[in-house]
Image (tube, grey):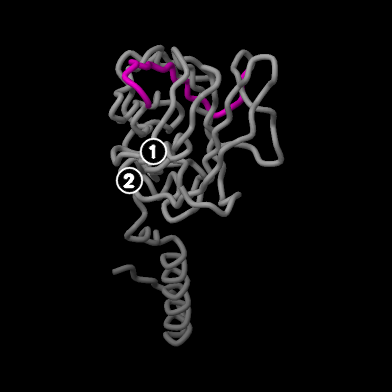
């Protein structure tokens, strides 16, 4: 214990001692460290600093895909006449699969897929509209496929940029050489939850009963329900 010895009146010594003790107690209270909240972990600290913390599993890459600064590409994927699933090249948090219905005839189609999040120079994209797409998937077939109306179930298009329970619009346009882009086929769907973020299972519904007149086209994903018909 700290003792204070002052000459003279014991009462003054007592008062000065009490004042000194009170001052020391006040300083000790101000200099004490308040413990952080129980949820103050590394992730919480990064969030407070404005850093985006990834919460989802990275989307797997397709076999043989090529990745560049502006897009990801799979040069050739075989299509089943009975319908099936195409691997969407993983790019910037997007990927997964694209289901397609049974094709007409017995011809063996294949397709080149290119994923991007911007209409980059050198790509083949429809004219910009009032709404900006959040994802592009360019299509290049080896011939002119036609599709039956029933979309098979399978793996969905997935992305960390898709929010479960939110609506998204799927739009397919076909590029007609010499004529430009055809009228778009559109529908909307509500995203479900996946380990990669959100998912859209019926993107390939835009192929239903469609026969391509040319070999190239583009699927775009927009935020919100921009049309009334559901996929």
Residue 104, percent from left and from top: 37, 26
Q: Which mark is residue 158?
A: 1
Q: Secondary structure under badge 2?
A: strand
Q: Which mark is residue 189?
A: none
Q: CA distance from mark 1 to mark 2?
A: 7 Å
Quadrant position of the N terminus in the picture: bottom left
What's the magenta region?
A: 104-120
Q: Secondary structure under badge 1?
A: strand
Is 63 magenta? The answer is no
Residue 167, percent from left and from top: 50, 52
Rendered residue at 60%/19% (across/down): 124
Quarter of the rendering containing residue 79:
top left
Q: Which mark is residue 194?
A: 2
Question: Furthest-bottom residue in view?
Answer: 11
Are the residues at dot 1 and dot 2 in contact (C-beta closer than 8 Å)? yes
Whether residue 122 is situated above or below residue 52 in the rendered picture: above
Rendered residue at 36%/27% (across/down): 103
Rendered residue at 31%/19% (across/down): 106
Q: Is residue 116 left or right of residue 203?
A: right
Given residues 134 and 2, the one toward you in this image is: 134
Quarter of the rendering containing residue 74:
top left
């Amino acid at each position: 214990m700290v003792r204070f010895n002052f000459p003279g009146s014991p009462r003054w010594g007592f008062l000065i001692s009490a004042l000194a003790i009170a001052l020391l107690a006040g300083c000790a209270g101000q200099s004490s460290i308040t413990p952080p909240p129980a949820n103050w972990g590394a992730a919480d600290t990064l969030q407070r600093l404005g850093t985006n913390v990834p919460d989802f599993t990275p989307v797997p890459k397709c076999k043989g895909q090529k990745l560049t600064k502006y897009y990801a590409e799979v040069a050739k994927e075989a299509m089943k006449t009975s319908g099936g699933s195409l691997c969407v090249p993983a790019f910037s948090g997007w990927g997964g699969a694209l289901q397609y219905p049974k094709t007409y005839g017995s011809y063996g189609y294949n397709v080149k897929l290119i994923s991007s999040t911007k209409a980059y120079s050198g790509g083949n994209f429809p004219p910009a509209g009032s709404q900006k797409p959040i994802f592009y998937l360019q299509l290049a077939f080896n011939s002119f496929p036609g599709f039956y109306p029933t979309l098979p179930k399978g793996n969905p298009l997935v992305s960390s940029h898709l929010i479960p329970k939110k609506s998204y619009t799927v739009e397919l346009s076909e590029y007609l050489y010499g004529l430009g882009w055809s009228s778009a086929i559109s529908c909307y769907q509500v995203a479900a939850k996946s380990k990669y973020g959100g998912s859209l299972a019926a993107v390939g519904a835009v192929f239903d009963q469609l026969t391509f007149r040319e070999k190239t086209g583009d699927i775009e994903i927009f935020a919100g329900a921009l049309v009334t018909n559901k996929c």
